[in-house]
Amino acid sequence: MPDTPKDDLCHVTILGTGSYLPEKVLTNADLEKMVETSDDWITSRTGIKERRIAAPGEATSDLGTKAALKAMEEADIGAEEIDLIICATISPDTFFPSTACYIQKNLGAKNAVCFDISAACAGFLYALQVARHFLNTGNRKTALIIGAEKLSVMVNWEDRNTCVLFGDGAGAAIVQSREKSDRKIIASVMGSDGNQTAILSVPGGGSACPITPANANEKLNTISMQGREVFKHAVNAMRDASMQALERAGLTAADVAMVIPHQANARIIEAITDRLGIPAERTFVNLHKYGNTSAAAVAIALDEANKSGAIKPGDIVLLVAFGAGLTWASTIIRW
Ligand code: UT7
């Protein structure tokens, strides 16, 4: 279901984007030495060639802060002008306080209200939509939204089914309300399905299953996924969310200059864009470099599309994501 009134009270615009990827590169060849896998399998089944791994002393908030500083630089916004910080993450620095609060401290953004959003790979688009609501009501003026993940700490590096898929990184955007702006969010769709929690989760470590030496040994505090099931849901949910957002915006797939989808698997992206009728040259893909960085993936891709000139002023851009929960979201922006 579309989740916002048809007419926004103001225009909500993205003023700047940023991203940060840790220096360490883990290639498929490196993984061949760790588990029984091959570059050929990983490339043909996922499209991933390498991913980034954060340093031991580098927390999710450190990645998010670096991405945020770049977004602030492009937007020409100072830390004290930011009055809302939302960090989407499933790998927070700590259970509490929120990672957004750590980022606030790092930036000196003393006027911001800060909280995290847990919506897995759809997290950045959830954050964008929540920020849009705050800005639309006039409650806040300038939001910093971040998708940041250090998934390497929750991957079972002995499980070839999952360890080849994920990476660390962060992306950010400065979002502001304007009376009128050509660059603006046009339409959004969000959805969730709590009946499918079991197909993608970290089962241990929370209140339902506190971590003990025994279950830590069984790796219950790492990512568990039924890949094929997730694949199916991902394709259907992202196709439907894209079509609903287009309909809400009064547009068709032919109007989309660039689709920036969640970066989990090249075959998932191809299945969605095939169904939408959007060709490869109008689809932004960077998962070969970073793998699946969950909440950070769309944010990093948006920044790379922006900085590389792949999206230009006036372009209709479709962002779409899907993740554990299940959660999904799509947003259409006139860039
Ligand atoms: O971010 C949102 C959430 N995540 C996703 O969207 C991911 C969704 N799922 C996927 O991307 C795919 O399902 C995977 C990439 C995870 C797996 O691809 P698949 O084509 O669905 O493979 P599969 O799980 O059905 O496994 C096929 C075979 C199995 O062997 P058998 O049982 O056929 O003998 C696996 O054991 O591939 C084997 N396999 C591997 N072989 C080499 C699984 N992982 C590996 C590996 N290297 N890393």
Image (cartoon, helix red, strand yellow):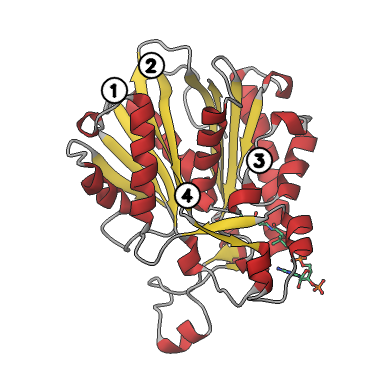
Residue 51 point in image, percent of width and height: 58, 56
Instruction: Tell me which numbered mark, 1 or 2, is placed earlier along the sequence.
Output: 2
Q: Tell me if label 1 and label 2 are in contact, CB under 8 Å.
A: yes
Quote the CA–CA distance across marks 4 and 3: 16 Å
Whether residue 175 appears in this view of the structure is no
Q: Residue at x 72, y 48 (%)?
A: 266
Please tell me the numbered disc located at residue 21. 4
- Check disc 4 and give the amino acid type: Leu
Q: Tell me if label 4 and label 3 are in contact, CB under 8 Å.
A: no
According to the picture, the residue beneath numbered tag 3 turns out to be: 285
Q: Is residue 3 above or below residue 289?
A: above
- Check disc 1 and give the amino acid type: Gly
Disc 4: CA contacts within 10 A as few (<14), some (14-19) or many (>=20): many
According to the picture, the residue beneath numbered tag 2 turns out to be: 10
Quote the CA–CA distance across marks 2 and 4: 34 Å
- Check disc 3 and give the amino acid type: Val
Q: Residue at x 67, y 63 (%)?
A: 28
State left or right for residue 111 relative to residue 212: left
Tell me the element at label 1.
Answer: loop
Instruction: Tell me which numbered mark, 4 or 3, is placed earlier along the sequence.
Output: 4
Front position among marks 2 and 4: 4
Quote the CA–CA distance across marks 1 and 3: 35 Å
Instruction: Tell me which numbered mark, 1 or 3, is placed earlier along the sequence.
Output: 1
According to the picture, the residue beneath numbered tag 1 turns out to be: 138
* Pointer 3 residue Cβ closer than 8 Å to ligand 1: no
State left or right for residue 185 relative to residue 328: left
Q: Residue furthest left?
A: 110
Quote the CA–CA distance across marks 1 and 4: 34 Å
